[in-house]
Every structure is written in C-alpha cells, then in structure tokens.
Amino acid sequence: MSTPEPHSKLLSVAAQRISNLGSAHSSEASLQRVKNMPGYTTPVFKGKDEQRTLVENTVAEKGFIPRELVANEVNWFYTHLGIDDTYFESESREVISDHIIALFGAKILAYTKHDPSKLVIDLERIDEHGNGATFIHTSSPGLTSTEGPGATCESRIDELFLNNSTPTNAYRLETYRSTGSISVTASQQLRCYFVTKCHFPTTQPATVPGQKTDIRSVSDSAFLDRVTKNTLDIYQQVMWNVESRYGPVMEVFEVEGTRERRLVIGYKMGGTSGFFSALSNLYHFYSLYSARKYVEQFSNGITIISLYLNPLPNSNAPPIENSIFQVMKEASLLFCLPDNPFFLPKSLGTNAVQEATYAYCGWIFAQHFCNRLGPAYLQLKNVLNENDPAHAEVLNDIKRRFREETFTRESIAQVIHAHPDLIRLLYVNFAMTHYPLDDSNNLMPTLSYQRLQTVQPLTDAELYDKIRRSVPNKHELQVLESFLIFNKHILKTNFYQPTKVALSFRLAPDFLPEIEYPWKPFGMFIIIGNDFRGFHIRFRDVARGGIRLVMSRNRENYSINQRLLFDENYNLAYTQSLKNKDIPEGGAKGTILPSLGANPRRCFEKYVDAVIDLLIPGQTPGIKEPLVDLFGKPELLFFGPDEGTADMMDWAALHARSRGAETWWKSFTTGKTAKTLGGVPHDTYGMTSLSIRQYVLGLYKQLGLREKDITKVQTGGPDGDLGSNEILLANDKTVAIIDGSGVLADPHGIDRAELIRLAKLRIPVSNFNVAKLSKEGYLVKVEDQDLKLPSGEVVLDGTDFRNGAHLRFKADLFVPCGGRPEAVNISNMAALVDGEGKPHFKYIVEGANLFLTQQARLYLEKRKVIVFKDSSTNKGGVTSSSLEVLAGLALSTEEYVDLMIFKDGKPSTFYQSYVKDIQAKIQENASAEFHCIWKEHARLQGTKTRTAISDELSLTLYNLQAELEGSDLYDDIPSRHGVMSRAIPKTLVDQVGLDTLLQRLPEAYQKALFSSWVASHYIYKYGVTASSVDFFHFARDLAKTDA
C-alpha cells in the first residue's frame, strides 16, 4: 500500500510513463495547426515619441524622481519593459506619469530591503465612467500568486467586468506578459491587462432559427481592427459551434515550429462566472504559462477566451504536447465549478482540478446525507406518537436541530482540507470505476489516467480501514465515510464528459436511512453547478413530476433551504406518488436551489442539460462520449411545470430534441405551449377543475342536494386556473371569494353573471363591479386601509384581512382553489368552529394542494365535516399530463407535428377529440374514486375518516401496482391487449392502431400502464378490502376489449 505523493512527483512519474510510450499520438483530440504568426496585429501608436516627451516633463514637474534620473526611467518604461502600444495609446500622460513614479518608488523600497525579488509593482486605473480599466503588476511565469497584486487581479477583473457582461454592456480583455524585465537588477516581468468596453454595431442582425451568425456583424470595432483573418476564421467556427450546442466549445491549436499551444474556449455569455481567473490556476498546475490571453465578447451573447500557452523551461511536468489536452479536459470541470474552495493555487499537496471537483461534489453530498439523527432520535420516535400533532411537532423540532448542529458546511469542509491524502485515495476509488476507457483504442492513455496509475488503488475494505486508522474522531470518520458511500452508489456520471455545464450523478438510493426515509425511491439524481444544486427523485422507473425552483429571499433563508432541500424533494415526490394513484407514472419531483443572485432560468437549463447527459448515450468524440453505465438500462424521465418553471417546459422539450432525443423529446415535458408544441393546457380545458367538480357533484347526488341552494366559500379567484373554472362550472350561491387581490363577499350570493365575466377575462376580484353587490356585500382590496364594512366593522389593513378571511366566513361548502399551503393548520384550525362547537362548513372539497394540514383535516372530520382531501380531488391535472406524455410517446415526430401542433393557430380534429378523451378519463377516474371512498366510509359506519380512507386507498393502489408490475399477468397476451385497448384513449388507438402503439411504447411504460389500469379499476370496483376471489373474477374479464 503506497501513500499519495506530492503532485509534482506524480506529474513527473506520469511524464516518464508518457515518454516511454514513444511516438504514440494523443488519443484525446485530433490536433489542429496554425502558422507561427500573431493572432492579433500589434497596434503602432504614432504619437508615442511626442507623448514620451510630454510624460518626461510631467514626471520631472512632480519632483518625486531626481531630475537627472527622469529621462532614464521614462526611457526604460517606454522601450525596455515591452509594454504594448495599446497602453500608451489608451492612457493619458497623467496616468502614465503616475505609473512611472510608482515603479520608481517600488524599486527604492526593494533596494532598502536589499532583495531585488521584493520588487513588487501594482499599477491600476479603473475608469470612473465604466469604459474599462488597466492593471499592471509583477508576475512570475507559470505560478499563481498567493500574495501581492497578482493574487487578486484576475479574480477582480472577473468580478468587475467579465462575470457581468451582457450583449448590451460587455467588456473585452487583452493581457500579455511584457518581454523586458523591470530593472537591471530585478528579473521579474510585468503582466499587463487592458479591459475596454465593447462597441458593437448599432443595428443587430435579425436572428433566424438555423441560420449561422456572421461574426463581423456582432463584433466589437476595436477587436475587428486588431484581429488577423486566421484568428477571425477560428473564432467564427467556434461561434457557430457554440450556437449549435448548449455547453462550452474547446479547441486546441499547435503553433507550427514552436511548442506553443493556443487554447480557444467559446460559451454562451453568463454561462459561468470566475472562469477566466480559474483557468490561470489550471494551466499553472501543469507548469504552463501564458504569453497572451484574450477575452472577446460578441453581441449575440457569446464569449470566446483565447490562451497562448507555453511550457516552463526546465520543468519536470508532463510535456505540453500531452498536458494541453488534460488542461482542455479539466477546463470543462472548471467551467462547471470555477469557484471551488478545494482547488487552491499551486502548493505542495494541492489537488488537481479533477480531485478538487470530486472533493466539492463529495462535500455537497456529505452536507445532505451524513446520517444526522442516530439511535437517540430512533428511541424517541418509538416512544412518541407521530399521529399526535403535539408529538409530531416535537419530533420535527428535534430533527431540525440535529441537522443544524451536527454537520455544518464549514465543519465538513474543514475535514476535507485536513485530509488531502485520503481525499485523493477516495477520488482514485471513484475514478477506477467511472473513468471511461475505450478498449478499441490502442493509442496513448490520457494524462489523467496515467496519473491514476501512480496511486495504488485500494479495495473498499482497505480504504475504509485506512480512513478509520487515519482520522482522530468519529465526526471526521463519518464525513469521510460519506465519500465512500457516495462512490459506492454512483451508477453513472457526466464527470468525465469532455463538455458539460453542470455535474450530474445518477445514484442508487439504497444508502438512505429507513428511519428518515421509510419509502425507498427507485432512483435519484444529484446535479451540481457553480450557481445551484439540485435533486431529482422518482419512486418508480416510469414516473413524472414537476421541477421546482426553490428561491431564497436572503442568506439566512438560503441556508435553511440548503439544509432542507433533499427532504423537501423527497416529501414532494412521495406525495406525488400517492396522487398518481391511477395513472402509469409513479411520483417524481425535481428541486433546484439557485445561489443568491443566480439567474433562475439559467440554473434550470443547466440542470436539464446535465440530466440529459445521463439519459442519452454520448457518441460524439471530444464533445459527448460514452459513459460508464452501471445501471445498464435506458432511463426515461418526465418533467412537469412547478413553482418558477411553468414557462420553461418548451425550452426543455426542444433542448432534448436538439440533443438527439428523437423518440422521447415530445414526452420529456408536460405543460408545453399548445399551439407550437402540442401541449394540453390544464387551465384552458379545466382539467383539474373537472376532477374537483366530480366530488362536488357526487356530494350533491349522495345527499340529495340542489346546487342552487348551496352556499359556498371559495379561495382562489377568477384570475386563476382552478378558481376561474370552478366559477364557470358551478351554479351555486357563492357568498365569498378570496384571492390575491382581496376579499369579495355577499351573504345574499355574489352576482354570478359578473363573476362569469371576470372568470372569462381571467382577472381578479378587485375588478368586480361593486354596484352588483347587495347592501350587505363588500369588496376589500389588499391595498385598502381603515375601510368600514356594511356591518360597521373597520378593516385596518386589507392584506391582513385577506390573509385571515378564510377563517371568518360560514357556508355549506368550502372549495379552496388557491392560497398558501397549510393555510388551515394546527394553530388556527379551531377558528373554523364557532363558540357552540358548530363548524363553519358542512363540506370541504380541497382543490388547492396542501391547503389543510393532515391534523386540520382529522380535526374537522371529528366534528362531522365531510372532507375530501387534495390527493383525491385535484388529480385531474396529473391525469391530463399523463395522457399528454402518452401522446408524445405514441406518435412519431411527423405524426406529432401533424396532429398535436396547431395549424394557423387552430387545433386539429385529432387534438380536439384527444382532449375530450382526456376530459372523460379525468371524470371517470374522479367519479370512481369518490364512490369508492363514499362506500368504504358507509361500510365502516363512519369509524374511519374519509381522509384516512383516501390515504389508505392511495397506498393500496400504489402497492398493488408495484405487485402487478412484478407479476407475470402482463405476459398474458389476451389480457394485455384487452387492457391496453381500454387504457389508451380511443382517439389514439383509432389513429395509430393498437399493434403499432404496442411496438412504439417502451416496455417499462407499457407495464406501468397495464398495472395502473388493472389496479385502479379493480380497487375502485371492489374496494380496499377486496379479496383474492374478487381479483380472480376481475382478472377473467381483462381480455375483453369492450370498455
């Protein structure tokens, strides 16, 4: 067993191995060559001599430099330092004079220290009008400065200018190393940086989809003046590649007759931050230095960085001929995580980018999955009753406190910094499994693979034993153990993909402790970017759910969101599983937590692209290559809209198509635009409201009620999906509506014609014509203050009144169609019961998700309120989305475009017929579940609440579907065909044909569709206590093809 060696030794060992391979060519890229000519023309400043005379006079006048030395100092500055004419042309003589004096002063200071190496130059000027900046400082080639001006200069340029560049306000940068030394006695060179504001053409070219951009039409005028034709041609090709891809584009060029290599990187503006400065640390790690560097911006939103790299003389690092490709590979990791605390400037024992990126990903994993509760919590959990609201609150409080205090981000990072040798061994353990090796390629192994060979890989047991013996306490052991757990459960990752925008890992979820996560997910993804982190969890192979952006108001809120992100994702996905009880897709959910100040849409796009990396096999050398796939089967994910992502579903579907997902891009997302992408909008067709409505109508029928006699309170107004459709479908006596704009109430019933007007316009109650209210009716807007109601009550603040209004009204029926989750909870539920113990409402149909907490539902049912909970009532939306997915999977791209996408703004006959099929399926499922719950409640004579029956029904269906998927019932061909002919909407079967559909639909999806149909129809017919004999009778009829 060997211990890790300093990286300089590792590099030299790798170099030796590479040189032993003789003249083998690099397997990493086909090298492109350019002539040994400058990539930019050097400007000649014609007024330089005249300026020098004026500067000499100015320096002499200031009196800081002895007059007899002035001419020599100015001459040295102008002719021996090798500063480009760009500087002299752009700076005023005042600034140049100050810089010459500053240089002289630095020489004096170094002389007093009797050490020429202490000569430090730090000159800068930042234009106060935002036109650019100049930075000049001493710089040793090939080394990242850890102190002095060089330590922060490039990161400041990133922060001040490059990170924030936009197509309308961009900055270009050129920087080079001066050719001369600072003085006769000091050999240091100067590094000069020139930042200038871009001046783009005033008229921008029209963007035509599929049309390539002419680089000249989007370039800065100063750039065009200086760039050579050869460089412009290279940048043009890079720009076209960036336009056709989502991730970064990287190209390497060999300069003929030299060892110089030019690395050109193009990406979409704002795609990363801090990247320019991070690149310097990277090439310094491989003992390379840059002669010149350029950052060019273009008004079509593209950034191109060009680095002119050379090997340091007398270095023991691998030759540049090999290391340049490693730089290119690792630059893709830096693009994802440029601000990585574990990739520090070059020093003994530091990590290479790959090891540092692995450390960062392990750090994120440990933050979420170090087991933070332990046996003490388990004992307490066993003692307390989780169904008791007070006990549940205590348990939650203790769980939250454990998580906050045991493993903090900072304490985990300290452990990682304290054990670089162990982190390196853990990285090798990860890489030995996931590093892709192409057996068919007999060319040279990559430098990163060569580097792996310098460390003796340990078995999992040996590595655990070494960690156990190396760390001083259990806290550190647990952190490092979590890295091993991470390694052991990664099934595939895009870590080694040549280009990517974020890192993604598909994990086997076996490591999740049952005490915290009693229901085991089928699969999970963790996605890590420079400005976000995210998860995706699904409870079945075939599963669907929304992708949610979790936004943070401030740093404290961000910390809370960070700690709770995985738990929120897990709980949402599990809840979705119970709601998806009678459709093929199990429950899934994705969450994205953007960093403070990050662009949420960009985070979503990176998240989606990184997930697609793991869904589509890579087949493009140097861009997307094959991965090590331990899962070994194709995977399909279905995304839907959720908080903050409703307007991003179109992009995700089209992006999947552009990435090559020809068979499933149509079904990848739901909630797509109807006209252009064939989506089925829930609000337009009232999909969710149709299922809610079945419960309301079911109540009326079972209890013999007339709708027009029923008084109703509704949250969620005429401007919302559920609220507007509830108004349009109902014919009751609505006495109050509460929405975001305020509270509308009338004890005699709100004028229905006026409500319908608002609902059709989709505008809130604040637009209600108050002339149509009775004398006792009123409208309180959120902005109102000190408003007197007809009763004489004074409303001090309209917003406060609105927030509590759902607790003040009384009616027969309450239908929440909007509002915040947990609006009725353990702390306010008693307010829905009057002083005599009489509830405000007789019936509650919970249309809005999680409007009531479970404790509140049980409390109200105990007081004889008939409550139907959200997971039963509002499943119309998920049913509609499920059938939208089915259409996407069943139709070829040509058929989909022809039948689902609108022509001249109008839907096809097929589309209209399919929508009617969806609506019928929603009503059928909702009505069947209503009657199942009602019958079961009657059978038990009210001894079990409808809320409990609904939960039990969801669980029974969920488990039965899983059992059926694992059974051989699906293999019975007549039964399969009989079920499929009824489960797939008639419009689709008539259009495509059942046999063709069964050829096209993925087998996993067919099994899920078959199982969900059988499970739901069986349970809805025979109830949750159905027997084996009942199933025997039911199964006999499966082969029938009639409905």
Image (cartoon, rainbow, N blue to C red):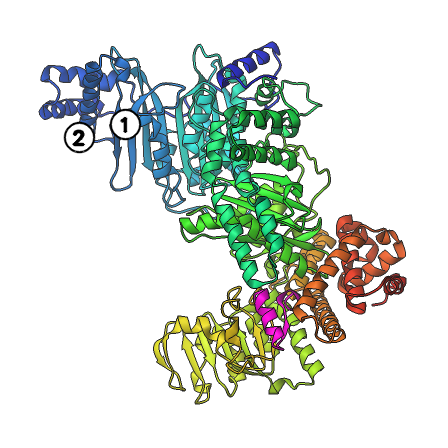
Which amino acid does the dot numbered 2 rest on?
Glu
Magenta segment, which residues? 853-875
- On the question of residue 208 being in view, the answer is no
Q: Position of residue 400 (x, y in %)?
A: 51, 51
Task: Determine the residue positioned at 68% across, 74% down.
Answer: 694
Foreground: 325 or 37?
325
- Residue type pointed to by label 1: Tyr
In the rendered view, tell whether residue 984 sits above or below residue 782.
above
Image point (54%, 62%), residue name: 390
Above or below for 573 versus 210: below
Secondary structure under the numbered disc 2 in the rendered image:
helix
**Label whose residue precedes the other's in the sequence (2 or 1):** 1
| Disc 1 secondary structure class | helix
Give the CA separation, mark 2 to mark 1.
13 Å
Would residue 617 be visible to someone looking at this image?
A: yes
Residue sitting at 60 percent across and 61 percent down? 675
Q: Residues within 10 Å of mark 1 (few under 14, many from 20)?
A: some
Res 94 label: 2
